[in-house]
Amino acid sequence: MSSQADFTRMLRNNRERLPDHFVTWNRSDPSVRVDVYRNTVLSSLIEVLLATFPVTAAIVGTDFFRAMAGEFVAVSPPTGPVMAEYGRRFPHFIRDFEPASGLPYLGDMADFEMARLTVMNACDANGMEARVFHELLADPDRLLEISIEFIPASRLIRSKFALLSLWQAHQHDSVQNISLAGIDLAQGENALIARSEWTVTALPLSEAGAALCHRLMEGDTLGAAIDKVSPDNAALDETLLVLIQSGVVAGFTHQQ
């Protein structure tokens, strides 16, 4: 193994003994210098996670979050150069992190925040104009036979916890003015996250609406999705309205 690979491994594991060939120019203890690099890398990656998951951090407190993030960094170092993508595995890590087991919604919140960041950094694509939808609505039989292509800047989040309300309550500039004390965390919430220009929005969906949207994202035609989900008329109308308002539809494919 090369010295560069050895050094990279040393940075990731502070419990591993330094190889004998690690020496400094003045023959001082090389572990001291390696520790400096380790601490710099660790601190930098924790700061990346703090920036990616601010509400997750606010829920548990900065000290707890830093300790949890440090454990994650030790077992999940970056695998690529784009730091905006680091932390994709963090929500899964949180769900298995025993000290956070008393907050079962924490991993879902991290998923929500990661989805927002992913949508913000997704490549640009224009959504179809609302008039195209209205033309399709005038032909219900044809509408049922279409499958929908979604823009890259869109994600569906489904949770048995009140994620959207909890996230909004932590936004100081939110027009919703939601109080933490008034949130029923056990009330599940779903949201379609989308970006319009540089603004990321999260539009709420009912359980049936979210299930229908999920089937459409999986490639089902609208008719097939309706058969699988069996939504009532209100959920169907809600889903179509959210798709129109969010601008997430890049195009249609008509299935014969």
Image (cartoon, rainbow, N blue to C red):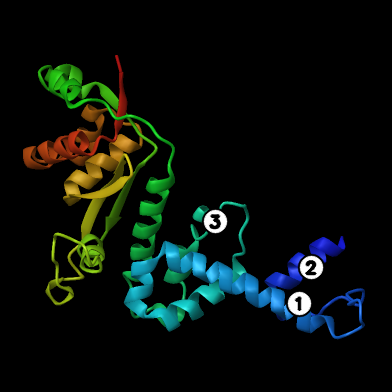
Residue type of the residue flagged with mark 1: Val
Q: Quadrant of residue 60?
A: bottom left
**Residue situated in front as seen by the camera: 121 or 139:** 121
Q: Position of residue 239 (x, y in %)?
A: 17, 39
Residue 73 is at least partly visible in this image: yes
On screen, residue 52 versus residue 161, left or right, reads right
Judge by depth and name the residue closer to the eye, 62 or 75: 62
Whole-angstrom CA distance, mark 2 to mark 3, is: 21 Å
Asked if the residues shown at circle 2 and circle 3 are in contact, with their CB atoms under 8 angstroms apart, the answer is: no
Q: Quadrant of the C terminus?
A: top left
**Residue annotated with mark 1:** 34
- The amino acid on which the numbered mark 3 sits, given as a three-letter code, is Met
Q: Residue at x 38, y 78 (%)?
A: 101
Task: Give the mark nearer the N terminus: 1 vs 3.
Answer: 1
Which residue is depicted at the point 18% across and 40% down?
242
Which secondary structure, mark 1? helix
- In depth, the one of 93 and 178 nearer the eye is 178
* Closer to viewer: mark 1 or mark 2: 1
* Discs 1, 2 touching: Cβ within 8 Å: yes
| C-alpha span from label 1 to label 3 | 22 Å
Q: Which residue is mark 3?
A: 83
Crowd class of label 2 (few under 14; some 14 to 19; many from 20; radius 10 Å): some
User: SS class of the residue under badge 2?
Assistant: helix
Q: Which residue is mark 2?
A: 7
* Quadrant housing residue 234: top left
Q: In which quadrant will I find the N terminus?
A: bottom right
The label shown at residue 151 is none
Query: Badge 1, how many Cα within 10 Å: few under 14, some, many 20+?
Result: some
